[in-house]
Amino acid sequence: MNRRTPKEEIMKAHLRPCLVMFVLLTLLTGVAYPAIVTLFAQLVFPEQANGSVVKHDGKPVGSALIGQAFDDPSYFWGRPSATGPTPYNSASSSGSNLGPTNPALLESIKTRVEAIRAAHPEHAGPVPVDLVTASASGLDPHISPAAAEYQVARIAKARMLSIEHVRKLVARNYEGRTWGVLGEPRVNVLKLNLALNEIREAP
Amino acid sequence: MTANHWIQICLFVGVLVATAKPLGWFMSRVFQGRPCGLDRVLGPFERLMYRLAGVDPQSEMSWKSYAVAVMLFNVLGFAFVYLVVRLQDKLPLNPQAFLANTPDLAFNTAVSFATNTNWQSYGGETTMSYLSQMLALAVQNFVSAATGIAVLIAVIRGFARRNSETIGNFWGDLTRSTVYVLLPLSIVLALALVSQGVVQNFQPYQAVTLVQPTSFDEPVMGADGKPSMDAEGKPITQKKEVTEQLLPTGPVASQVAIKQLGTNGGGYFNVNSAHPYENPTPLSNFLQLLSILMISGALCWTFGDMVGDRRQGWAVLIAMLVIFVPLVIGVVMAEQSGVPAISKMGVDQVISGTQSGGNMEGKETRFGIVNSGIWAAATTAASNGSVNSMHDSFTPLGGLVPMWLMQLGEVIFGGVGSGLYGMLMFAIVAVFVAGLMVGRTPEYLGKKIEAFEMKMASLVILIPPLVVLIGTAIAVVGPGLDYVVGDEVKGNLNNPGAHGYSEVLYAFTSAGNNNGSAFAGLTANEPFYNSALGIAMFVARYWLMIPVLAIAGSLARKKYTPPGAGTLPTHNTLFVVLLVGAVLLVGALTFVPALALGPIVEHLQMTAM
């Protein structure tokens, strides 16, 4: 009979615990855990758990958390998006990953600055940085209040509204810091544009 | 730096330190098998698991037996992940009908998740089925973290015990970490995240009609599958209307909770916690940020408690904070100052009440500069690796900080368990150096530090830099610069010059220290990087874990040496200074030349533009 070396003894002693523990922990953390979280999430926070979908006339028109591409002069524009093949492709999130010394980045920012300036002849000052830089996700739903204010006059002209009226809508969609401390002030572009459309639909 | 910057940084650090004691106390009870409250509910369940597995948690293991158990369990986990992602097209819960992973991607992913690195060569929402995410990846998120904690607890026992041949039972430590620590915290955090808007369901992706249809120029594909060219050699394009958006969903919150708590960092989506469905609000951001460092910080307290002198735990935690806080401030300042060349184009990068300003390329509006900066430092201090902004687009100095935090060896908080056992290796080096100065045999926590411990500690400290530097060197002399798809040669790097080199250095730094974050412009999903980084992750995890367990075994066997007149106290300011000095010196001396070629050159270039 072969005598087992101590190493083999150790291996043998560990084999059953290893296999059984792996199966048990897989069932616990890979099946039971997500199932329990899903169950509670769907019971307590069904809207959030299903993507915070925004509806208009009963039809889903997007998510409050996911930005959409806007390029019509009568809408507020969001941030540039680096997703492919189209901007704001929510099925494939991505940033540009271009470094600050990359000529490709500087070139595209220059093009964006020129386009923004051409669309806003009323502004002589510098362009808010978030309007010409791509977000991390490519799906950023927000712009800074400065970027919203920059576009107000254009929207007012395109929609034949008073500047004050548009500003009021921006203010209504302003989200401040959480508890006045966390995060940054911002404006949700999709919600703001939906609010703009509602004015047009009203008589 | 504005007042709000300081408040957000102080609030984060303050809450982090405040959680150390309660959570540390709880974990100390759990691992000593004493009543902790939760055992009344979960105790029967724990015992059932032991019974099914034929484990007696009281039956202790030698360090070698413990190491064999760790390795067997991890190899099994690796094999399982590999199989699931290779076969996901044939398995259920794949509503988007994703293909099986390629062999090199499956190898890379399996090593990555088993080693608690969570480097991702793939984009989650376009690659992994729900089943792969849950059954393969989320499970490893739990058990790789639990493995790290278990090994740390074994090391702590090594310090605490006298004349003992054993260092605990791996199956017991593994089960307790998972059932009492990681699972309850994850359930609470996951639900908190869902309340903020993180999705959690098993629906297929949902199509919605856009408010404003847009159009874009789509290249026309020829019969050979390549873009057709016109007479002038330009690609022919056609207008294509986009009227719909496909909202990705899935069991995201459950995944995100454990990815943060277990310092895994592997995102559900490609852009990780920058994705609005993974991290929708400043509050969800704060909770995730806290979860990244919380367990690693609290384990310092657990360490102090279990070795019988809580001041020892605080000393280590303070040393971590002394390095961490200035680097947080450094990265925030670098990012806030923005890019000079962009200002010159007529862009406003100045912070004001209505915009966060600064370098906003690759950052989200809701997080702005300060939360992106704190996160970048926290995720690389811990070996977490999740991101809420794109590090590749950081300013050179802003990108240097996360890179260097990893290069310090992932000991500033570090991975759950692995961070503290790494830091204890530096503590051994620190007392050894102090011992040399006064010509006395060094001691740490009443244990004589002798040649064997020093050899093992040196291995632990030197292996990661070796992996990082050799890996980077091999990549940049050729194999890591381009790759072949079909008959086409493509470049791996997304940026030219010094920044392109930084992408490679960052990748090996991340894999060689089990972090998992990336300068994500690097195309890593091809055979060279998938294999090279896979090997780097494997070496950096297990070749450290085994010497660490050997030290645990050797220390447990030693007798207690009462402190004498020549003993260096290890709970005071002098020791903190020595420990911080050891970490910084090794980190700086090893990596300054490599960093000089990347971020430092790039910084000079940027300021000259």
Image: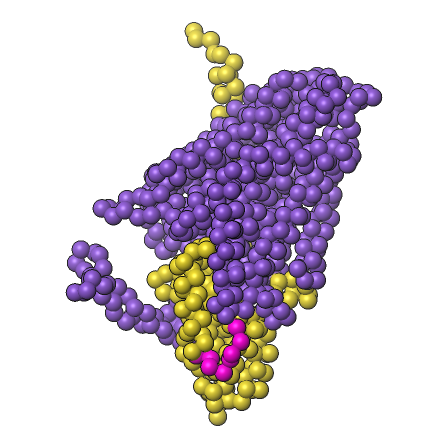
Residue at position x 30%, y 68% in the image? B217
Q: Is residue B242 visible?
A: yes
Estimate the x, y position of residue B443 in percent, counting from the top left.
Answer: 73, 22
Task: Choose between B321 and B366: the one closer to the eye.
Answer: B321
Closest to the observer, B316 or B478: B478
- Image side of residue B410 versus residue B427, left or right: left
Relative to B567, is B487 above or below? below
The question of residue A118 being in magenta is answered with no
Q: Residue furthest bottom?
A: A203
Is residue A125 rendered magenta in the image? yes
Q: Give the farthest residue toward the right.
A: B565
How many numbered marks have been drawn onto this rendered protein structure?
0
| Range of residues picked out in magenta | A119-126
Q: Picture quarter containing residue B356?
A: bottom right
Q: Nearer the viewer, residue B287 or B509?
A: B509
Q: Position of residue B509 (x, y in %)?
A: 50, 39
The answer to whether B254 is drawn above or below residue A43 in the figure is above
Q: Using the rendered image of the protein, determine whether residue B297 is visible from the camera's viewpoint.
A: no
Q: What colour do you see for chain A?
A: yellow
Q: Residue at 48% of width from left, 35% of height from top?
A: B468
Q: Main secondary structure of the magenta part?
A: loop
Vertical comparison of B21 with A191: above or below:
above
Chain that appears purple: B
The residue sitting at 45% across, 86% down in the picture is: A158
User: Residue B21 at x, y = what percent?
Assistant: 74, 43
Please identify the quadrant where the N terminus of chain B is shown.
bottom right
